[in-house]
Image (tube, grey):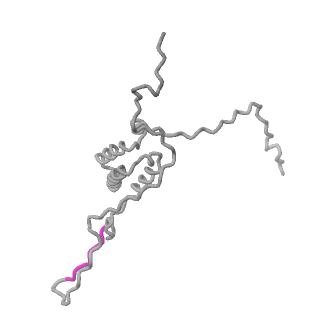
Amino acid sequence: MPRPPKPRALRQRRNKAATRAKLRPGGMRAPALPLRGCACGGPKPQPKRPKKRGPGRPRKPALPCDTCGDTGILPWHHLTQAWWARLWASPMGPEYIESDVDSLYMTASLVDAYWWGNGSDAKLASEIRQQLARFGATPLDRRRLEWELEKPEAEEATPPDSSPPKLVADPRATMRLVG
């Protein structure tokens, strides 16, 4: 006669992962992307004009930076901003803790460099893929982390009507030929 199984509370090995979670739809508001300094160093003061004009042409004013427009703040690519908003709006957003945000900022910098490079750098794309795997960005990563998306309950399906279909009169029969 086989022994009955032990109660669940008394079992020693539960195979329960520490990362297991049930994710609900509807993420959270994304934190702001950090400000980054441009390599140009920002606006430069105009040189003072000497009282006496020296030999040669006068100096030309410095051209504004093409990247930041002399603001000194490096802008984020619009696709990076859209990716950032989608990441936090996803069901995985509430699972990220404060210490994850720093790594996500670094990943955002990689995504930004990828898009400013017209999306053609394969090495950068592979690094982004590896970084995003840490945060459950793909279905396979969520399965590895044992994150399960909560599916909305299906609405009650109405049973099909068993009565025979109703015949509709031909609308052409109501038309008269006016001649």
At horizontal 44% and vertical 48% (from top left) the residue drawn is: 93
- Front residue of this view, candidates 18 and 10: 10
Residue 118 visible? The answer is no
Instruction: Indicate left or right for 54 with 71 as reference.
Output: left
Residue 39 visible? The answer is yes
Farthest-out residue, top: 1
Residue 43 in percent (x, y) is at 29, 73
- Front residue of this view, candidates 43 and 156: 156
Farthest-out residue, bottom: 52
Queried whether the magenta region covers residue 178, the answer comes back as: no
Farthest-out residue, left: 55
Snapshot quadrant of residue 109: bottom left
Residue 130 in percent (x, y) is at 32, 43
Q: Is residue 78 above or below residue 171?
A: below
At horizontal 43% and vertical 25% (from top left) the residue drawn is: 11
Q: Is residue 167 above or below residue 109?
A: above
Q: Is residue 47 above or below residue 11?
A: below
Snapshot quadrant of residue 165: top right
Residue 163 in percent (x, y) is at 77, 31
Q: Is residue 137 above or below residue 101?
A: above
Instruction: Indicate left or right for 11 with 153 as reference.
Output: left
- Front residue of this view, candidates 139 and 12: 12
Magenta region: 57-65
Count numbered badges in the picture. 0
* Magenta stretch: helix, strand or loop mostly: loop
Residue 136 in percent (x, y) is at 40, 42
